């Protein structure tokens, strides 16, 4: 698989320990900032969030630790 033309560097990643925990790699950036950067006419912010939901559906409910907003 080749590197995407638009891809410059990772903005988010996963810590793996007892839990798989996502985090933003750039100081001062939020998840919304990352979503705005990746959104375009092919996949908007709603599409990226839906992809995330589809990903975590793989896990059993007791394996997901949700943050309160």
Image: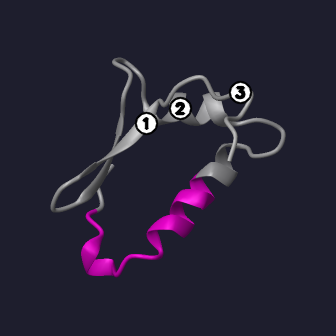
Label 3 Cα neighbours within 10 Å, binned few <14 / some 14-19 / many ≥20:
few
Q: Which residue is mark 1?
A: 12
54, above or below 5, in the image? below
Separation of disc 2 and disc 3 at Cα? 14 Å
Report the residue that reaches farthest toward the top.
28
Q: Which residue is mark 3?
A: 6
Q: Estimate the x, y position of residue 66 in percent, counting from the top left.
A: 30, 61
Q: Estimate the x, y position of residue 30 in percent, counting from the top left.
A: 42, 29
Q: Which residue is mark 2?
A: 34
Report the residue that reaches farthest toward the front.
1
Q: In the drawing, does residue 35 fall left or right of residue 69?
A: right
Label 2 Cα neighbours within 10 Å, binned few <14 / some 14-19 / many ≥20:
some
Q: In the drawing, does residue 62 fall left or right of residue 40?
A: left
Q: Is there a contact, CB below 8 Å, between mark 1 and mark 2?
A: yes
Q: Estimate the x, y position of residue 26 in percent, counting from the top left.
A: 38, 22
Report the residue that reaches farthest toward the left.
18
| Numbered disc in front, either 1 or 2 | 1
61, above or below 29, in the image? below
Separation of disc 1 and disc 2 at Cα? 8 Å
The verdict on residue 63 being magenta is yes
| Numbered disc in front, either 2 or 3 | 3
> Which range is magenta?
49-65
């Amino acid at each position: 698989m080749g590197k995407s033309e638009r891809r410059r560097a990772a903005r988010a990643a996963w810590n793996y320990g007892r839990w798989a925990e996502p985090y933003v790699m750039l100081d001062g950036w939020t998840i919304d900032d990352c979503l705005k950067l990746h959104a375009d006419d092919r996949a908007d912010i709603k599409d990226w969030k839906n992809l995330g939901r589809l990903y975590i559906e793989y896990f059993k409910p007791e394996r997901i630790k949700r943050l309160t907003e």
